[in-house]
Image: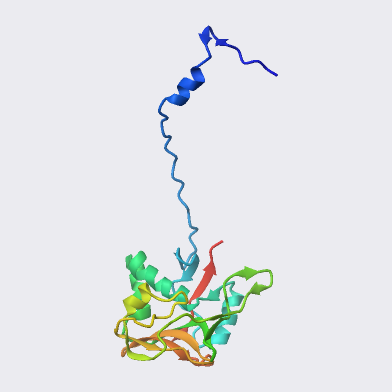
Amino acid sequence: MRKIPDKWLGEEIKGSLEKVLSEPQTQVARPVIPVNIPNLNGFIYVPSTKLYVAKERNHFNENWNLAHESLKQEDSFMMNMYQFVEFLKHLKFVEPNDENLAIYESITAVRDPYRGEWIDAKFDSNGNVRYEAKHKTQEKGILTTVEPLQKYLAQNKTPGISLDEWINNHTQQGLPKPKIKNGDLWYWAPINDYVAGFEADSDWAGLDCVWNPDSTNAGLGVRAAKIKV
């Protein structure tokens, strides 16, 4: 075993370590390393969902099932209702810059022309919601899952519910809560074999959970989403 010397360069070593340990220690400032989110052209990053969401809709005049297939070909997918409402929250309340507010208005404003977009949620008579894209990629692709709906507003409000309250205080599955305040956003509650979408025109804006998945419309499209990698 190596012996520790009693002196070094003529100075006593004994007691030096104890002295150092007894003195107040200076805190060393650690540099803050920023987390750089890669810029994906044409998309907005939403931290709460860790998704990139397209600024513009595409695949117009495609029904719900075809829109799913079209997005898969682009390595993208359709947002579920939670992800969609969190996207709205990001645009208006989290990062309300000029571009984001303009996109928010393009989705929710009561004005012409008609604008609609599909949402990944299909409902059944047992109180479940099915996601065609659960958004957890595996070797075999994107999973389809079914889960029971939590307590939500189960009756139609035409009009309406508070858009801001829905955005800021929704269920974990993105639906309005049962005691949501009244407002101007039209709402159709989920029913069996129908799917969700959001639409607006010169008369009203609404969250529609009774959309026929076979519907098509020149103003009805889908907003692509991608997983942050």
Tell me the residue at 57%/86% (across/down).
65
Left or right, 14 with respect to 101, comes to right
Pick out the residue farthest to the top. 10
Q: In which quarter of the image is residue 88?
A: bottom left
Is residue 155 in view from this perspective? yes
The percent position of residue 95, horizontal first and vertical second, equals 36, 64
The percent position of residue 139, horizontal first and vertical second, equals 68, 69
The percent position of residue 143, horizontal first and vertical second, equals 62, 75
Left or right, 95 with respect to 197, comes to left
From the viewer's side, name the closer residue of 131 and 43. 131
Pick out the residue farthest to the right. 1
Question: In the picture, which quadrant includes the C terminus?
Answer: bottom right
Compared to residue 203, the image places residue 136 above or below, namely above
Q: How is the image coloured?
A: rainbow
Left or right, 134 with respect to 117, comes to right
Is residue 218 in view from this perspective? no
From the viewer's side, name the closer residue of 221 and 207. 207
Tell me the residue at 43%/80% (across/down).
175
